[in-house]
Image (spheres, rainbow, N blue to C red):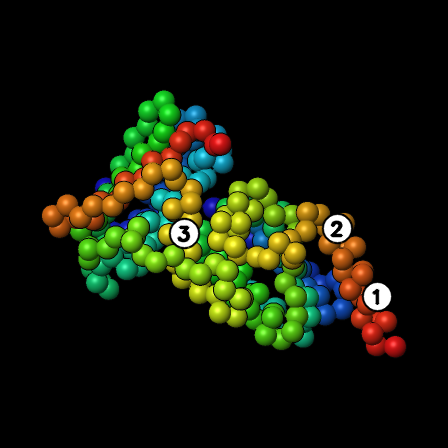
Amino acid sequence: MALSIQVEEGRSFTKTMRIAGRLDDQTAGEMDTELDKVLATALKTLVFDLAGLEYTTSAGLRSFLRAQKAMKQRGGDTLFVNVQPPVKKVFEIAKAANLNTVFRSVRELDAYLDAMQKKAKEDAT
Amino acid sequence: MIADARKEGPAALDRLEALCRAAGLAEPVVLELRLVAEEVVTNVAKYGYAPGAAAAMEVRVSMDDDAVSLEFRDSGEPFDPLSQPPPDLDAPLEERPVGGLGLTLVRALVEEARYAREGPVNVLRLVKRRTQQ
């Protein structure tokens, strides 16, 4: 099963990586390559939309941990949305993401990002 | 029988998955069986044998009314995956080890796990219930 990755730019300094298919030893390298490209840009928030991700092995978890470490190092955030039950179970076992960073829907995620933007504006003035 | 897990591992895992699905197991159970098998096969392929040597192994599947049993046999270095110290999953992100997660998943997703070194062979037996709790 192949992996597909789409990168979308929405809000400023925010990128969404839509990961679909399967993450395993064969495909995690593709994800790391895309991830490095994304991390090479000015970025404060990295969103993983996992609506289409049906399966991940520990190789995929390592990539997600790598992403979170890299974002934290630059003072940014990594957020997850639409994590499907089989992948969520694996995330929970391995504690691969902080539960505060996992959103059930794009709507919930947008509300959070709106609040963050508002707060950033207020802090700036 | 897998002549070299580095080359034939993915195809063997596809067969295992198809077999579990054909046996009528629920999709989440099929994927979890594939996942535990994939972690074990990948481990043997990566660390079980000297670089360059064929990572020969065998995966046996058996089922009864209640459970699916997987047996993995390889003649690589003696290695008991069940005696490895678990990674610290609660360490802060900066210090989180990225290794050891595969075996953590294996242990969590099966009901029974036993390892034995039988002569020159590593034997890992995993048992998973057919139905999810």
The three-letter code of the residue at mark 2 reads: Glu
Query: What residue is at 82 percent from the left and 67 percent from the top?
Result: A119
Snapshot quadrant of residue B14:
top left
x and y, in percent, of residue A21 in the image: 53, 48
Chain of the residue under the numbered disc 1 shown in the image = A
Mark 2 Cα-neighbour bin, 10 Å: few <14, some 14–19, many ≥20: few
Q: Is residue B84 left or right of residue A103?
A: left
The correct choice, above or below, for B61 with respect to A9 in the image is above
x and y, in percent, of residue A89 in the image: 53, 45
Query: What residue is at 11 percent from the left and 48 percent from the top?
Result: B119
The correct choice, above or below, for A85 with respect to A6 in the image is above
> Which residue is at the front of the view, A17 or A97?
A97
Disc 1 designates what residue?
A: A118
Query: What residue is at 37 percent from the left and 25 percent from the top?
Result: B66
The three-letter code of the residue at mark 1 reads: Lys
Checking the image for residue A19, the label placed there is none
| Labels 1 and 3 in the same subunit | no
Q: Secondary structure at mark 2?
A: helix
x and y, in percent, of residue B130 in the image: 41, 29
Q: Secondary structure at mark 3?
A: helix
Nearer mark to the viewer, of 3 and 2: 3
Disc 2 designates what residue?
A: A108
The three-letter code of the residue at mark 3 reads: Thr
Compute the Cα span from label 1 to label 3.
40 Å
x and y, in percent, of residue A93 in the image: 49, 49
Q: Is residue A83 left or right of residue B44?
A: right
> Which residue is at the front of the view, B10 or A13?
A13
The correct choice, above or below, for A73 with respect to B28 in the image is below
Q: Secondary structure at mark 1?
A: helix
Which quarter shows the N terminus of chain B?
Answer: top left
Checking the image for residue B104, the label placed there is 3
Q: Farthest residue toward the right? A: A125
